Image (tube, grey):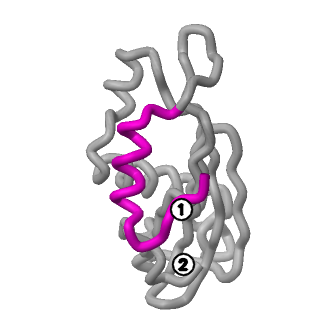
Amino acid sequence: MAKQDFSFFHSLRVRWSEVDMQAIVFNGNYLNYFDVAFTEYWRETGLPDVLAQSEAGLELFARKAGIEYHAPARFDDVLDIGVRCSELGRSSMRFVLEIFKGDELLVSGDMMYVHADSRVRKSVPVPQDWRDVLSRFEKAQPIRA
C-alpha cells in the first residue's frame, strides 16, 4: 500500500533491547510493533477496549499474522506504523500494517482477528456498530466485505 492510504499511524522509537547481534531489530519484535500499533488504532476508533470486551464475553482473537521484511530497522530509529482495516467478514477482520522509516517501507504484514464468544470460543458476527465505526474511520479507503 502507499503510505498515504493509511488513516492511522503510530510512532515508536527502537530501543536497544529490541536489536540483535547484527544491530538490527530482531525479526520477532516486528510482530510486537504491529500489536502495539493495532492497540493504539483500536483505542483511536473508540470501540470497546480489551477489558470491556472481556467483561462482555465477546472478544477479538488473533487468528493469523503474516509479515514480510523489506529492510531492517536499527537502534534509535523512529518508526511510523500504519494500520488499516482492509476487510470485514461475517466474524473476521483483516488489518494491513506497514512499518516505515520516513518514506522507506521496512516491513509489511497483515493480521486477522475473529470476533468470538470467549466463553465457548466460537466465532460470532462482528457487530454492525463496529462495522459502521471502522468504515467511517477508514474513510480514505473502503473496506472490502
Of residues 49 and 129, the one nearer the viewer is 129
SS under mark 2: loop
SS under mark 1: helix
Query: Looking at the picture, which amino acid does disc 1 mark?
Result: Glu
Q: Is residue 62 magenta?
A: no
**Which numbered tag is attached to residue 134?**
none
Q: Position of 58 compared to 96: left or right?
A: left
The image quadrant of residue 53 is: top left
Q: Which label's residue is closer to the chain start, 1 or 2?
A: 1
The image quadrant of residue 46 is: top left
Q: Give the answer, above or below, for where 26 lies relative to 74.
A: above
Distance between the Cα atoms at labels 1 and 2? 9 Å
Q: Position of residue 95 (x, y in %)?
A: 56, 56
Q: Residue at x 45, y 52 (%)?
A: 38
Q: Position of residue 21 (x, y in %)?
A: 67, 70
Q: Residue at x 70, y 80 (%)?
A: 70
Q: Give the answer, above or below, for where 44 lies relative to 120.
A: below
Q: Position of 130 compared to 3: left or right?
A: left
CB under 8 Å between discs 1 and 2? no
Of residues 98 and 5, the one nearer the viewer is 5
Q: Position of residue 4 (x, y in %)?
A: 44, 83
Query: Looking at the picture, which amino acid does disc 2 mark?
Result: Arg
Q: Which residue is mark 1?
A: 18
Q: Which residues are magenta?
A: 126-145
Q: Is residue 91 visible?
A: yes
Q: Position of 136 compared to 71: left or right?
A: left
Instruction: Determine crowd level at label 1: few under 14, some 14-19, many 20+ residues with C-alpha closer than 10 A.
Output: some
Q: Which residue is mark 2?
A: 74
